[in-house]
Amino acid sequence: MTADAGTLTVTDRASGETVQVRPATLYLYHYERPGSEKLYGVAALDADGLVLLDLPGGWHAPSLKEFAAQAGIPVSGSRYQSPAHIGANLAARAPGWRRLSGLPRRRRFTMGHKVAVVGAGVAGLAVMTILAVNGMWFAWRGVSTLGRILVELLEVKWLFLAFFSPLLLVMRPITGRLHRRRVGQGSIVGPPSGPYLVGRQPSTLEVAGGGQTLATLRRGRAPGQANGLLLYRHEDLTGLFILDSLGKALHHLPGPWPTTDLDRFAKRNDLTLAVHGLTHDEYKTLAKSTNSGTP
């Protein structure tokens, strides 16, 4: 990361991407999500406090502050902010928002890869079955452990993970099918990987992802209770606000959401649904006034 006359230039060594922004502030954040997942990073904010660039990962605070001081860019921190507040800050994206994670892009499976994975998974499942039938479950656990070590050493995860953890090969399509079925019923909405919304009876709305409940809101018509959904578009941004009956934003979920699935979910869970394009002031007001968010 370098700075010149207020312009910040960041290069992602893993992907080779380079991004330039002119931030008003650097926001150093650190918080813990449900499930003990600790998230660190620094975000470049514009003059409205919207995120231009998110750089997740561990940053040495003294070095960052020294760098920012030399570049003439103020630094703010999240030390006295709640996890919900930090999530809302990071969910408030500026038009043109980018995130550089420093991780290599995932390779897409070719048909040959898929055939190899399925074949290895079937072979691994057969080995597991034979060992289990013959009372040698402890042997399978040893083989599985060895397989995971080889996966990390050889970095051919698509093959070895399928062989030594064949249950994943079986369970993933099943869980995906169950998730799609619940989406079709209107009991949940969003991708299996999350974040997604779950309607709990009698009057609870949950934001979930990664096997964890990320936020819980009470449904109802009283102020401060989840009463409606606003699917928005603002320039190149899309996302979802959960609103109360007075139109106050309670939770912000940036990113694409399927309108048909949202409509089905809203009807089943007695929520209103509105779809609007927002002006910059409208978007900024909602994004910066919300109580919590899932970035």
Image (cartoon, grey):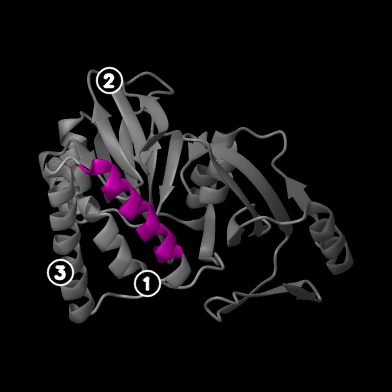
The crowd level at tag 3 (other Cα within 10 Å; few <14, some 14-19, many 20+) is some
Amino acid at the residue labelled 1: Val
Q: Which mark is residue 156?
A: 1
Task: Return the mark for residue 203.
Answer: 2
User: Counting residues from the N terminus, which is met first, the one under dot 1 or under dot 2?
Assistant: 1
* Helix, strand or loop status at disc 1: loop
Q: Nearer the viewer, residue 51 or 66?
A: 66
* Number of the label disc, if any, that sits on residue 119: 3
Residue range (magenta): 136-152
Quadrant of the image containing the N terminus? bottom right
Residue at x 15% of width, y 40% of height: 182
Percent x, y for residue 131? 18, 48
Residue 165 placement, left or right of 45 = left
Q: 7 left or right of 237? A: right
- Of circles 2 and 3, which is in front? 3
Structural crowding at the residue carrying mark 1, measured as other residues with C-alpha within 10 Å and reported as few (<14), some (14–19) or many (≥20): few
The mark that comes first in sequence, 1 or 3, is: 3
Residue 107 appearing in the image: yes
Tell me the amino acid under the disc marked 2.
Ser
Q: Nearer the viewer, residue 261 or 107?
A: 107
